[in-house]
Image: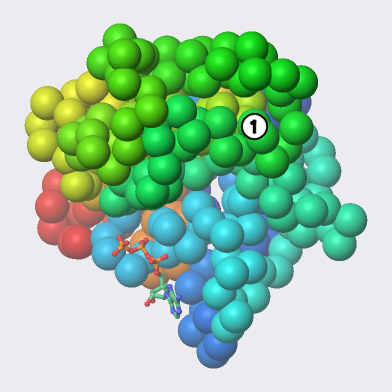
Amino acid sequence: MKDNMEGRKLVDQMDVKFQTRDVQVYYGDTHAIKDVNVDILDKTVTAFIGPSGCGKSTFLRSLNRMNDTIPIARVEGKILLDGEDIYDPKVDPVQLRAKVGMVFQKPNPFPKSIYDNIAYGPRIHGLARNKAELDDIVEHSLRRGALWDEVKDRLQEPGTGLSGGQQQRLCIARAVATEPEVLLMDEPCSALDPIATAQVEELIDELKQNFSVVIVTHSMQQAARVSQKTAFFHLGNLVEYGDTDQIFTNPVDPRTESYITGRIG
Ligand SMILES: Nc1ncnc2c1ncn2[C@@H]1O[C@H](COP(=O)(O)OP(=O)(O)OP(=O)(O)O)[C@@H](O)[C@H]1O
């Protein structure tokens, strides 16, 4: 991987959320992720870009062990979150996913009320001692999801009755309700119209004040708008990682340049 470290200030260890070292992911005999070494920063939006099938989602899912749910998937190498190996047998994947939340391509609210969509995670993780505390978490999370004003008078209505963009903000609010440290987003706007996309992008910009956000996107415009760091993947390799401005204006690797200028992908 060509990492343009020259001139870049040395990153303080405190700023690093994930360190990945020599990460490989296999699906049976398919080697989907090859030797990926990257540091993902706190309070930063990192975009994963690259042509279809290059491994963006696979690598994203390895960061909260969602690949564990795919029987033929195998992860090798080290993935450290705040210095702790997330694949250590002592780590409970359910607790890990509360710390490393995920938002998917298609909004997927539970078939429950708006309130219960948010309250579900805090209830199972015992984050509220009583109803008043749970109410506070629900309100705070919906505010963080930029949805509170639109739903505060209908919290008992089904989450599935909201518009697509509102459902996606509900899913983001649900993910933040368990007080995660990282939010993984796999093409979170691909099912949304331009107005809902703009709202979610604005929200991502706010979320980075409190979280490390990693977003997979097919839209280079979106990567350029929302992220400060960009990682370009190609055929399972992390080809280039650096400041988003630099990746889009002055890529080091010819494969990155071909992709951003539309010659591959
Ligand atoms: N569940 C799975 N079982 C077997 N192979 C898989 C599975 N998921 C992904 N793959 C393979 O792993 C490789 C990487 O796929 P992945 O979905 O991570 O790429 P991607 O860059 O996210 O693609 P896209 O942009 O199209 O979503 C591909 O060759 C894909 O066919």
> Residue placed farthest to the right in the image?
90
Among the 4 quarters of the image, the one containing residue 21: bottom right
Relative to 18, does residue 42 appear above or below in the rendering?
Answer: above
Q: Nearer the viewer, residue 171 or 191?
A: 171
Q: Quadrant of residue 26?
A: bottom right
Q: How is the image coloured?
A: rainbow
Tell me what residue is drawn at x 15 percent, y 47 percent.
261
- SS at circle 1: helix
Dot 1 alpha-carbon crowd within 10 angstroms: few under 14, some 14 to 19, many 20 or more = many
In the foreground, 9 or 236: 236
Cβ of mark 1 under 8 Å from ligand 1: the answer is: no
Whether 110 is drawn above or below 68: the answer is: above
From where the camera sits, is residue 9 visible?
no
The picture places residue 56, in percent across and down from the top left corner, at: 41, 57
- Which residue shows up at 64% across the image and 46% down it? 97
Ligand 1 shows up in the quarter that is bottom left
Q: Is residue 127 left or right of residue 157?
A: right
Q: Residue at x 60, y 80 (%)?
A: 71
Q: Is residue 160 visible?
A: yes
Which residue is label 1 attached to?
A: 122
Count how many numbered circles sit on residues in the image.
1
Q: Residue at x 45, y 28 (%)?
A: 115
Query: Where on the picture, by quarter, is residue 81?
Result: top right
x, y (%) of residue 193? 11, 36
Label 1 is placed on what type of residue?
A: Pro
Whole-percent x and y of residue 43? 55, 20
Location of residue 113 with respect to 72 vertically, above or below: above
* Quadrant including the C terminus: bottom left
Residue 11 placed where, x, y %?
65, 23
Q: Residue furthest bottom?
A: 29
